[in-house]
Amino acid sequence: MTRIVQLVPEVRAGSGVEGVAFQLEQEFRRAGASVERFTLREAGGGWLKLPEGGLARTGMIALRVVWFSTVGTVRARRFLAERPDVVSICHNDVLAGDIYVNHGIVRAAMRARGHYALRMIRNPLHLFTTLRDSIRYRSGTHRVVVNLTEGERALLRRLYPRLKPRAVVIPNGVDLDRFRPATSEERAAERARLEIEDHETVAVFVGHEFERKGLQYALEAVAAVAGVVLVVVGGSTDMIADAAAQATDLDVSDRVRFVGRQPDPVPFLRAGDVFLLPSAYEANALVVLEALACGLPVISTRVGFAPDILVDGKNGHLVERTEVARGLEAILQADLAVLREAARNTAEQYSWEDAARRYLDLVGEIEREKGVR
């Protein structure tokens, strides 16, 4: 039997890295593999609980990253040494594992947002993770790096020309049962809850990093296009307050709904007509697939998976950050029913079952290399 260990701070249903690990775990088990977890808890960091928001949350996030990268590395290597017949998949932080899944490159994210040197200097965590990942990519820590898009593989090779592990591409999947087009009743119920009229066009934005994800550009687009209501999912209390002030300055506060952090984005996607992601950088942007699966055309910058799956005028639009309004206007003039069908058809090509199968093929290769099969 194939044995797999996933190294990741947390595993749980939802979006983000922990959600990817959760979906893969489910599919690996359905395929007959044995799967174990090495999480922050196994690394002795179970006491590092995240507060709700503010500077305390930011500080705790940094501490968790440092802990899992250092103490976690030592304990993970010990954990894996006791299991020589497993193939290990690392998703974050730990410097261990046969396979490393590249969920994002800090250097690329900071360069994309501008003022690279200043951003690196003012946040010691960025310097720490950049040094850690230089060791990761230039050493024999991992056998393979899985990138989520072809563009990300090319970027990794450009930023780390002495990349030692081989680099492959396996796109993320999407839960096609959970993320599906809303029924007319579901759509009406969610809009009523948000106090949105049925005739209004609803744009949805999902993300916890408002600056990198480009919320300001979404707000400016709503200000430029009449009849559009923006639903903003995510963000801390402070971030929401700043964004709400910007909405007031743009005179669109009555057309913006800030709903904060939510355990499930599905209800808000059900209320929507279009999804906005004017981000500066994404390694993949799983939420784009989730929105498409819900039948929402996507307006996105050329980041992550978006250039690989979005076709202008068919299932969305690729735009510059300052051109979101142009994309919205095009959506308003198009046949939304046709766009919604095309969006769903695109997402149906990327199931988690298919993604897991590709990982299992890679695991099989490594098992043969290690002589455990």
Image (cartoon, rainbow, N blue to C red):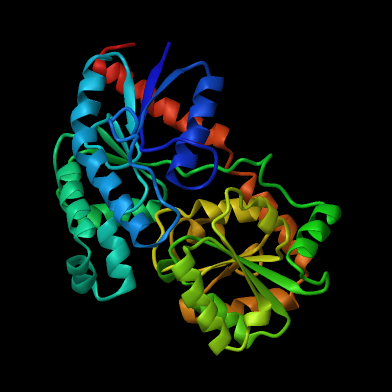
Q: Is 223 situated above or below 108?
A: below
Q: In this view, does 350 lie above or below 256?
A: above
Name the image quarter holding the N terminus: top left
Residue 342: image quadrant is: bottom right
Foreground pick, 46 / 97: 46
Q: Can residue 301 be seen at all in this image of the molecule?
A: no
| Residue 307 in the image: above or below residue 78 | below
* Residue drawn at (74%, 51%) of the image: 181
Residue 365 in view: yes
Image location (x, y in percent) of residue 219: 56, 79
Q: Nearer the viewer, residue 339 or 91?
A: 91
Can you give x and y, in whole percent of width and height, for residue 205 in the image?
A: 57, 65
Total labels: the figure holds 0
Looking at the image, residue 357 sits to the left or right of residue 298; the answer is left
Q: In the visual, does 304 lie left or right of 223?
A: left
Residue drawn at (51%, 16%) of the image: 32
Q: Where does the C terminus fall, quadrant-wise? A: top left
Q: Position of residue 177 (x, y in %)?
A: 69, 39
Rendered image quadrant of residue 78? top left
Q: Tell me what residue is drawn at x 61 percent, y 85 percent.
A: 223
Residue 280, given in percent of the width and then of the height, sits at: 40, 68
> Where 32 sits versus 291, above or below?
above
Q: In this view, which residue lies farthest toward the right? A: 185
Question: On the rendered structure, is 211 left or right of 347?
Answer: left
Residue at point 46%, 44% (across, down):
171
